[in-house]
Each structure stands twice: as C-alpha cells, then as structure tokens.
Amino acid sequence: MRMCTTRFIFVSFMFAATWVGGAYVNGTAEIVYLPSKGLLWVQAPVGFALSLVIGGFFFVNPMRSKNYMTVMDPLQEAYGNMMGSLLFIPPLLGEVFWFAAILASLDWNQTSYGLPSPLERGESAMILPFVLHYLCPAYISIAGLGAIAAAAMSSADSALLSAGSMFAHNIYRKILRKKATEREVLWAMRTSMLVFGAGAASLAFYSNSIYDLWFLSGELVYALLFPQLCCALFAPRSNTYGSAAGFLVGLLLRLLAGEPALKIPPIIFYPACSLLGGSYVQLFPYKTFSMLLTLGTIIAVSYLATVLFQRNLLPRRWDVCNVLGETSTHTPLRQMDKQTGLQTVPLEENRD
C-alpha cells in the first residue's frame, strides 16, 4: 500500500513538472479573470492533460518499440525526409508559441499599480503576479513569484530543447548535412535554440495574451500534426501523397478560419460565427473539424494514389515519391541466357 502511494506521488509530481509551467499558471488566471470568459473557457489545461493520457496509452509503446528519438522520426520514415521537414513546421511553431507564452508571463517588476484596473489597462494577462504582489503578504508574494519562476524556467528549457533537437536530428542531420559529426549536430542544435528563442521573445512582445499563445502552441500541433502522426503509426498504407494533401487541406482550413490572437481575419465563416469586440468569434469546433478532414484526406488520397499507380492508370514514372517501392533493375536469368548464349544450371536441393 505504501509503495502504491509513493508511486502515485512520484507520478503526480512528474505530471506536474511536465504539464505545469508559467503559461499554465498565468494563462489560467488570465482567462478566469476576464469578464467575457471565465472558468468555463479555461480549456487548455484539460486539453493538455488529456493529451498526456492519450499519448501514454496509445503512442508511447509504438514510439519506444521502434526506438524513435523524436516525434518527427515516424513521419520521416513513413513519408520521407522532405515531407518530414515540411511537417516540422507545426511543432516548431508550437514550441515557439509555448516559449513566447512563458516569456510573456515574466513581467513581474511592478512597483505601484492603482487605477485603472488591469482589465481597462489591457494587462489582464498579468493578473496573477498583480494579486501576489498587491494583495498578499510579502513572504507569500516572494514564494508565489518564485514558484512561477521555477515553473517558467522548467517549461522554457524543455520547449527550446525540444525544438532544437528536432531541428538538429530531423532537419540538419537527415537533410542538410547527412554526414555531419556529433559535434556539428550539437552546434546546430545550440544555434537553432538561439534563433527560436529570439523569435519567441519577439512574439511575446507582440502578443497581449499569455493564454492565447499557450493555446496556439497545442492547437497547431493538434490540427496539423496529430492526424499525420496517427496515420504514420497506425495506418501503414498511408503515403507521401496523402500526407502532402492532408497537410495542405489542414493548413488552408486553419488559416482561412482566422486567428484573433494573431489578428488574422477569418475568410470562412462557420456556423455560429459572431462579431464580438471588433473580432470574429467562431463557436463552431472548426479545429476538430479541420483535424478530422485532414485525417480523412490523408487516408483517401493515399489509397487513391496507390490504386492509380498499381493499376497503371498513371505511368509509374510519375511516382516521384516511390509509394510502390523500388522496382528491380536486375535482368531475369532466362533473358540473360539469351543475351550471353550461356546456359544457367539450376541448383539442386540438398536432400537427406
């Protein structure tokens, strides 16, 4: 009984260390504070918690059984290195948005506040540090801000290491420099971390909402990369043509739906779309709709491409992605006999 309790505590701390960061703490407080949102709109914590559970049940064993190092490895194995480099964009943007949300949560150096309120000043994203600083005793304020700093640092280094390792292992080593040494790959990872960190810092200055950046970090991966990963692991007949078509469909649907956090106006107005506060709000679950349509496109186009090439409805030379496998270039033995005038003697079976 004591061992089970100890393991449960260790697992709880592990989940908290992986899941809780500066964006989680400050972003949740921001949405709860906003009068137009509230507790019901705090969806990201539930979504990230479910992603950990689903990943543990369905994705960890297939990934570990094949010794994959990053999430890009099964995609490059199924669809090729070039298509895998294109699929690197959604997780890269997700890590950049995640790190930007963490950086946006670090503005704690406020000495006096007064009126107007944080909502009127447009500083609702900083409501938790304000509460700790102005409404709590000094020792609680110091402990609370220290806890936020620890959560932010643990999430920040994981985001940068994830993006840098994916770039170095899946893009630099497999595409740009196939004969790169370990030292060269290490420096490529360090340089990419510096570039991604600078991009995330500039994005943090641009955005006014921690929660929006945090939400975008998971939403892009969910809408664009999740169906690709599902097909790569559980649909072995999916191929590069389906992957490219699915990525294009998902990207177009996501961009055309707009994004208020990045000030992108919508072009497709889904049902229950309304104009609130000068920006359009899509109440239709268009992100899940985009994910499902991407998944269906990958499977349908992969099957269609395979059938067209297998039945010679399209010339085999058009199969630039080689979805049917390499054709043998060896000359048959009987044809070789006719060309050389020699006779091939078949080997007899060794009988006891």
Image: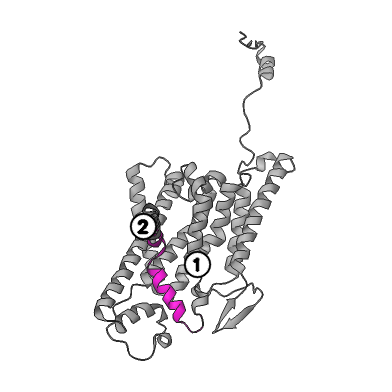
Q: Is residue 175 left or right of residue 331?
A: left
**Residue 262 lies in magenta, yes or no?**
no
Q: Secondary structure at mark 2?
A: helix
Residue 54 placed where, x, y %?
52, 56
- The residue wearing badge 2 is 193
Q: CA distance from mark 1 to mark 2?
A: 29 Å
Which residue is pictured at 55% across the width and 56% down the height?
A: 226
- Residue positioned most to the left: 139
Residue 351 placed where, x, y %?
62, 9
Mark 2 surroundings: few (<14), some (14-19) or many (≥20) residues within 10 A: many
Specify the quadrant that holds the C terminus.
top right
Please identify the dominant SS of the magenta region: helix
Indicate which disc residue 155 carries. none
Please report contact status of discs 1 and 2: CB closer than 8 Å, yes or no: no
Q: Amino acid at mark 2?
A: Met
Mark 1 surroundings: few (<14), some (14-19) or many (≥20) residues within 10 A: few
Residue 146 placed where, x, y %?
28, 70
Q: Is residue 337 left or right of residue 163?
A: right
Residue nearest the observer in this picture, 202 or 14: 14
- The residue wearing badge 1 is 46
Residue 89 visible (yes or no):
no
Magenta residues span: 14-37
